[in-house]
Amino acid sequence: MKKYKKILAVLLGSAMAVSMAACGGSGGSSDSSSDDSSSGDKVSITFWHAMGGVNGEATQKLVDDFNASQDEIEVHAEYQGTYDDTITKLKAAMQSGNMPDVCQMYDVGTKFMVDSGYIVPVEDMFETTGYDKSTVMDVITSYYSVEGKQYSMPFNVSTPMLYYNKDVFEKAGLDPDTPPTTYEEVMEYSKQIVESGAAPVGYSQAIYGWFFEQQLAGLGAYYGNNENGRAGDVTAVEFDQNGAGLKVFQLWKDLMDSGYCENYGTTTADTQTAFFSGQVGMIIESTAILKNAIDSSSFEVGTGYLPKLEENPDGGVIIGGASLWMMDTQDDVKKDAAWKFIEYTTTPEAQAAWSMETGYFAINPAAYETEDMKAYIEENPNFTTAIDQLQESPVNNYTAGVLSGVQTESRLIFNEIIPELYDGNITPEEGVASLADQVNKAIENYNASVGK
């Protein structure tokens, strides 16, 4: 308990203002709430989540389908607000002892959850039901695994990819079926789009720390030392030492200095809107917005892999989104019930329905073999881009993502530095140095707070 209180003190003092637009936590919900008592002879468990709007409806349907599939367990889904709202409420619940049985937590909350001491690793439950760990793709579970043990179950999973306006490509004399694969080509295509008058802006990317991490992973480079925290705790960043940070900062600066690209700020929805309205020919964004992009655009949307800075066999994409965690409520009956619900969410049928309703990946490859999913993909060919890109990404500690207790804060710091870079107030070298210095201080404070 003392250990957790130290963690809580430092993390409550950290800014938690970044909601990962790419990963879905947003306002509004029709979810039901309930107390934690038994429903008749059924075991009653509580599930906290951060899925609002359409995604909230899909989450409630998943819960309802599970409840209808058996007569032993009743899951009560309770919407907690954004991801940041959820982690704040969970910290309070940890102190009060009134935790949910299952909690959805965004990817950057992983290190906090592991360090908290208030969770039951899902892998501890696999043998109780004979669960096959290979049910979920390794490239997905690797993010939520520490020292070879899987701690949580991936739930809503996304990666970044390229979106482009096929009508603009045709007007610019570009092949609408051949998107750029490198940032060098992105620059060339952007020049042709603007100079041909096909669109006012060739390319844009929101100021978003997640993209920085993705571009480092594409270079086969680590953000933090000890292999991104996978071979030991992160004690300092590595992007300032391995040269990859400078390559990415220089890229962002060159794009904006070209005159063919535009910056729409840190609110990812603003960049999306510019693309949906036809003002921008290409953007990079989460695979999770695919359904919205198609529905919101009057033109034909094309998709491609996240462009590369350089070819690297170890490079790939990192998953984003959130996972389901089992909370240690000291109740073995509810623990077993919580695991059975989580296990259900990974079944092919449940994953196919979830993916089609939300646009997130189906984490179980068998979901893509269901008849409904086959028909859906045939009607939505852009969906195969996201699937293929993820399946082709190597499974290693570059693509496993950064396991750091301060990654939310790190992204906020990044978002503050990039506008200074764009405005010419700092050089790429100075930007990298500033980011490294500030994140290193945050890492030092976090590690001290948890006795590391």
Image (cartoon, grey):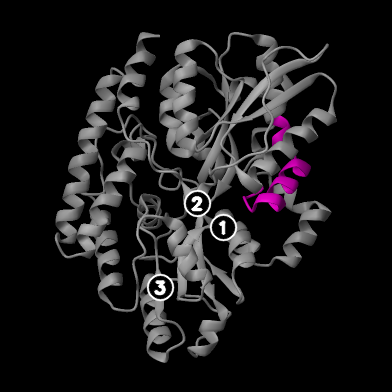
Type of amino acid under label 2: Ala
Task: Say which amino acid is labelled 1.
Answer: Ile
Magenta span of residues: 343-362
In terms of secondary structure, where does tag 1 sit?
helix
Q: Are marks 3 and 1 in contact (CB under 8 Å)?
A: no
Q: Earlier in the sequence, mark 3 or mark 2?
A: 2
The residues bearing labels 2 and 1 have C-alpha atoms spaced at a distance of: 7 Å
For label 1, count other residues whose C-alpha is less than 10 Å away and answer few (under 14), some (14-19) or many (20+).
many
Q: Is disc 3 placed on a helix, strand or loop?
A: strand
Considering the numbered disc 2 on the image, is that residue within a helix, a strand or a loop?
helix
Q: Quadrant of the N terminus?
A: top left
User: At x 36% / y 39%, what residue is drawn?
Assistant: 408
Residue annotated with mark 3? 203
Residue drawn at point x = 48 percent, y = 60 percent: 285
Residue designated by label 2: 22
Query: Residue at position x 48%, y 25% from top?
Result: 89
- 377 left or right of 390? right
Dot placed on the residue nearer the N-terminal end, 2 or 1: 2
Provide residue 238's location: percent of width, then percent of height.
25, 44
Residue 278 image point, x, y percent: 50, 76
Residue at the disc numbered 1 = 289
